[in-house]
Image: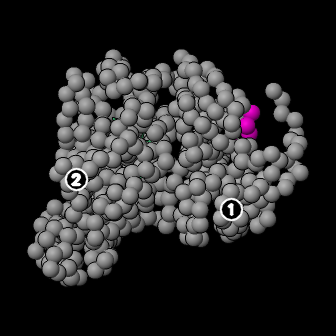
Amino acid sequence: MATTINVSVNGKKYQDEVEGRLLLVHYLRDKLRLTGTHVGCDTSSCGACTILVDGKAVKSCTMLAAQADGATIKTIEGMAEKGKLHPLQEGFKEKHGLQCGFCTPGMIMTAANLLEDNPHPSDEEIRHALEGNFCRCTGYHNIVEAIKYAADKSKGGDIEHADAKELEKPLFEVPS
Amino acid sequence: MRPFVFTQAQNQEQALAAAAANETAKYLGGGTNLIDLMKEDVERPSELIEVAGLGFQEIKSNQNGGYTLGAMLSNADTANHPDIRRHYPLLSMAMLSAATAQIRNMATNGGNLLQRTRCPYFYETSMPCNKREPGSGCGARNGMNALHAIFGWNEQCVAVNPSDMCVALAAIGAKVQVQRVNGTTRTIDFSDFHRLPGDQPEADNTLQPNELITAIELPKPAFSKHYYYLKIRERSSYAFALISVAAGLQIENGTIVRAGLAMGGVAHKPWKLTRAEEFLTGKLPQTKNFEQAAELAMREARPLEDNEYKVEMGKKAIVRALTQAYEKNA
Ligand SMILES: Cc1cc2nc3c(=O)[nH]c(=O)nc-3n(C[C@H](O)[C@H](O)[C@H](O)COP(=O)(O)OP(=O)(O)OC[C@H]3O[C@@H](n4cnc5c(N)ncnc54)[C@H](O)[C@@H]3O)c2cc1C
Ligand code: SF4
Ligand code: FES
Ligand code: FES
């Protein structure tokens, strides 16, 4: 039996019929084609699927799409604004916070929630906040650096967005 | 995952009526435990009744000096609430040691009370497990049981309750408020909320069918100064406790006037250390008293094949938690 959901994703409103058991991550990836949110473990362990639901970081592999009815969702695709990278994205780029990149969207969304609650976290607070995000490549050191970069950058007011020509066109065409 | 009907209840009456109308329906809090178990085919509800949006999201102070925590409030919002941090830091500390930021954002207080055991045999549907499938046997009793109980188990089930929050609630002495289909409510003492396996290992607690948890009641704060939640695990973050100890001390003029002490990872329910609490009352906060309390607490431990380590670890953990509790703000 289908349920109708209304959600806002990265500022766009959607109304869809979803089956009860459809996971939110599959709704985002398969239905909305927002494939920046990854599925690593599918058991709420690895954090690759982390997104913001009403501003809070959650693991979208253990949430039903139906549970998101009425919610405002942000995924990694919604972080850059007007062709400018979000300071966290810029931090990951500048500080080499990624290697294969699989964990990165989840890391960034978790870090976004952290910086919202605690704009100037200590190294230890960053590491504690990332406890539910696994990275198999970097050893975490540069991820912590990347988040500190973003925290420094946004000190004293509105977040500034860096230039990013790369963002102006998609890397590949997504079939609709 | 098997298909099911998703029901969005508009209010508590609707939720209760939907539950009463379908024996195989389940309430859905944050879903962090239930959805996981449905993916594993361990839980197979035919309907989920979402209760996270029904309200019950408040933290209120009561006339008796205690507090009421809404059952549908998230673990994160509860643990980080200024009143809870200030008056019940033991509870905050225990809750923040659990799971991860994302899971605490989703998980509700009511759901946390009902989270199911992490016994690996319970999760593996090809294995016998009396909890999952009554009468099929207990895989862990003579299998791999390093993570299992040392108190209160029987041949039917040797599993432990995995919740950190519940260990702190046991030490503090909370109550659980539930709403019934017929419109009445009841309040359950925390020590009567979870149960030992007995001859019904499938039942983790004493809730009756369809009862909806609406709140957790906390008594007047007693351990806001001297408290500690010690969680011992296989890695230092993001793991369930092998053993945990929630310790609270109320000290007046250098003497302990009240102790709250409970252990996690040792029994089918949060294990309240009543005898040790009584022993400590009226004593000085000194190592030798902490050690005696620990001896008393562990006297009746009955380890299994693979978990004898928990007895010694448990004693040391009690002494350390009490010492840290005392030294905090000493
Ligand atoms: C990877 C991972 C690691 C974790 N680590 C820890 C840890 O270290 N320590 C720890 O303590 N916990 C840990 N948890 C468990 C987590 O705390 C629980 O999953 C969570 O508290 C459950 O809350 P929920 O609201 O999501 O419950 P749900 O999954 O929604 O529900 C759980 C059960 O409660 C019932 N229910 C829910 N709300 C109500 C209500 N109001 N009235 C009646 N019944 C209700 C449901 O029907 C279901 O049976 C971990 C979880 C995961 C996934
Ligand atoms: S200990 Fe309990 S949960 Fe684990 S296999 Fe035995 S009956 Fe099942
Ligand atoms: S894919 Fe969701 S936590 Fe790993
Ligand atoms: S960069 Fe490869 S998993 Fe983190």
What chain does badge 2 belong to? B
Residue A37 in the image: x percent, y percent?
69, 43
Q: Is residue A34 magenta?
A: yes
Chain part drawn in magenta: A33-37
**Mark 1 on the same chain as mark 2:** no
Quadrant the N terminus of chain B occupies: top right
Quadrant the C terminus of chain B occupies: bottom left
Query: Is residue B267 at least partly visible in the picture?
Result: no
Which of the two residues, B100 or A116, is positioned nearer the viewer here?
A: A116
| Quadrant hosting residue A63 | top right
Where is mark 1, residue-wise? Answer: A154
Residue type beneath disc 1: Ser
| Quadrant hosting residue B321 | bottom left
Is ligand 1 closer than 8 angstroms to the Cβ of mark 2? no
What chain does badge 1 belong to? A
A166 in relation to B285, above or below: above
For residue A112, side relative to residue B84 (left or right): right
Where is mark 2, residue-wise? Answer: B66
Residue B7 in the image: x percent, y percent?
45, 22
Q: Is residue B212 magenta?
A: no
For residue B215, side relative to residue A4 (left or right): left
Query: Is residue A117 at least partly visible in the picture?
Result: yes
Residue B4 in the image: x percent, y percent?
49, 23
Residue A117 in the image: x percent, y percent?
54, 57
Per the image, label 1 sits on a secondary structure element best described as: loop
Which of the two residues, A16 or B235, is positioned nearer the viewer here?
A: A16
Select label 1 or label 2 by which is in front: 1
Residue type beneath disc 2: Gly
Write down which quadrant ligand 1 falls in: top left
The image shows a total of numbered marks equal to 2
